[in-house]
Image: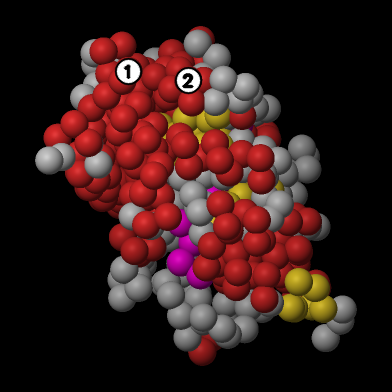
Amino acid sequence: MGDQINCLDYLKSKTQVDVDSLDIRVSIELGPFVDCTSNQADAYQELLNPRHADLLKKAAALANEIKGHYHSVNFEELAMELSMLSLATSIAPKITGAILVMVNPRYSYSTAKIIDNGQRLYRLCKFLEPDFDLSRLIIKVPSTWEGMQACRKLKNFNVKTLATTVFSMEQAILAAEAGCIYISPFLNELKATFDSTYHDPSPIFDICVNAQRYYEHHSYPIRVKACAAVNVEQILQLAGVHAFTAPADQLRELASMQEPAAKLAQRSLFKQPSADTNTNGNTHVQIKGHSNGHANGGTHEGTNGITNEDAKGAALGNTEGDTRGESGRSSDETLKKRTFIDDESEYRLAFSRADDGKAQMKLTQALNMFSDYQVKAEALMRDNDMTKIG
């Protein structure tokens, strides 16, 4: 069987491993990690913990104190941003890289509002922690046309951005042109990460592989930070991606697992060497199957890390998928230089067709879900507004 290796240690040897949790205890227990990522769902769920009662009250009081300086935003949203930044900056000493916070997802289709939100988050961070190095703050922006145009402008203000909710190569290309430093492809529909009974029939392993190859081939200074796996098997298949951010339960499971290093290497879609390596040394991985969700266990010895024979209910299922990779394109086609940044009509048409319309559906679903959590978090802020209590 070969030498056994801890799966989390193995992953860290191949990929930048980030923590997708605003619970500082996770970074202390399992770290060190590089970056700490978050979104409105993470923030809301963490803020519900009674141990943050004082943080909520402090954020509400600060929001009332400074709201006169932020006329474009209401009390609830300002207090939410202060709370989210307070959680993130408290984790910064426990990680080696950056903290990532998301703009209000309800602004996903407004370039002007996203620009204002991104700049405000930088100012609020400096207000909360005057000594914090703002080069360690990255703003997560939804990968809409409007969002990427905002990232293009925010770069001029030295605001670093990550393009989140990426489900297609069209979004990945637009993000690179907009000057984002990361993209976050969601392996599965966001719904699948919240509902264990729901399975995404077409996760986007191929986007992670092809986007990374595309960036390296065209020398774009942007990295792939994959996320939204539904189990650790999916994560291990992406060992070799630039970065992966995972929640506490998956990180704990990886930390508890031991497997032969050779078996883990065989599983990866990024494994080297490959029979299909272009003249620039970039490996093309042909995706032959897709994960269907939450089942664990099984054997992972199929081609390019994809399970064969259905793996007795393991993480991967449909082994009869398109062998040409993203959207059925061949290797040469996925590396062909494309541009969208100055052609809104062309981009919108291309994105609407991506994965037969599934990418657009997944994006809409994710933005709606994140927006729901934004509303919930703002309601929590109202409940802690001492000026309205009693």
Q: Main secondary structure of the magenta part?
A: loop
In reply to whether residue 61 is colored magenta, the answer given is no
Q: Amino acid at mark 2?
A: Phe
- Displayed quadrant of residue 254: bottom right
Q: Note whether residue 334 is visible.
A: no
Give the residues in magenta.
Answer: 222-231
Tell me if label 2 and label 1 are in contact, CB under 8 Å: yes
Residue placed under numbered mark 1 in the picture: 66
Q: Is residue 220 above or below residue 304?
A: above
Q: Quadrant of the C terminus?
A: top left
Measure the C-alpha gap from mark 2 to mark 1.
Answer: 10 Å
Of residues 387 and 4, the one drawn nearer to the viewer in this rendering = 387
Of residues 227 and 356, the one drawn nearer to the viewer in this rendering = 227
Q: Residue at x 39, y 44 (%)?
A: 54
Give percent across and percent down for residue 180: 52, 27
Q: Is residue 6 left or right of residue 128?
A: right
Residue placed under numbered mark 2 in the picture: 127
